[in-house]
Image (cartoon, rainbow, N blue to C red):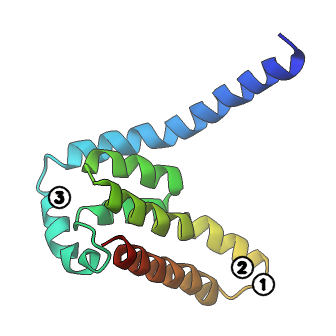
Amino acid sequence: MGRWTVAGVRNGLITAWELGRVMVPIYIAVAVLKHTPVVPWLSKMLSPAMGWFGLPGRAAIALVVGNVINLYAGIGAMVPLQLDRHEVTVLGLMLGISHSLPIETAVLRKMGIPIFFGTGLRLGAAVVAGLLAHMIGT
């Protein structure tokens, strides 16, 4: 094996470890929470808002986790929720636009962009994209 191949494998393993370290615990936590009253309660409370995007209330878990922690945590939270292709697409699009808000807000602040403007813009764009994706997909 050439040197670049060994380095590539090493970097790939490091990346897999870093992603798995975030995704696996979130996946397990959401899978466990599904069997408690938390997910049904949260689903009931958030169903009206999530319905605008064609998503079940339980999808709010992945949206919150992805926005608060990071995109990969949101993906990890999505898997045990048993969403269909359309729901995964809408939710993935929204998370792709607005994810890791605490970290990205700090970056925006360092760049001199007002926090409420930058965060509002990302959340607003995610909402508009989610609505459009739902409308186009139905």
- Residue labelled with disc 3: 38
Give coordinates of residue 113: x percent, y percent.
73, 85
Q: Which of the pair 26/4 is nearer the observer?
A: 4
Tell me, yes or no, whether the two marked residues, 1 and 2, touch with CB atoms within 8 Å: yes
Is label 2 in contact with label 3 (beta carbons under 8 Å)? no
Tell me if mark 3 has few (under 14), some (14-19) or many (20+) residues whose alpha carbon lies within 10 angstroms of its own. few
> What residue sits 68% from the left and 88% below the top?
114
Please state the horizontal and vertical placement of residue 84, each as a whole percent of the image.
28, 54
Q: Which mark is residue 109?
A: 2
Give the residue at x 73% y 23%.
Answer: 10
Q: Earlier in the sequence, mark 2 or mark 3?
A: 3
Q: Look at label 2 and name its amino acid.
A: Arg
Element class at badge 1? loop
Residue 112 badge: 1
Question: With respect to residue 80, does 109 lie above or below?
Answer: below
Question: What's the CA distance linking mark 3 and mark 1?
Answer: 39 Å
Q: Amino acid at mark 1?
A: Gly
Q: Is residue 85 left or right of residue 2?
A: left
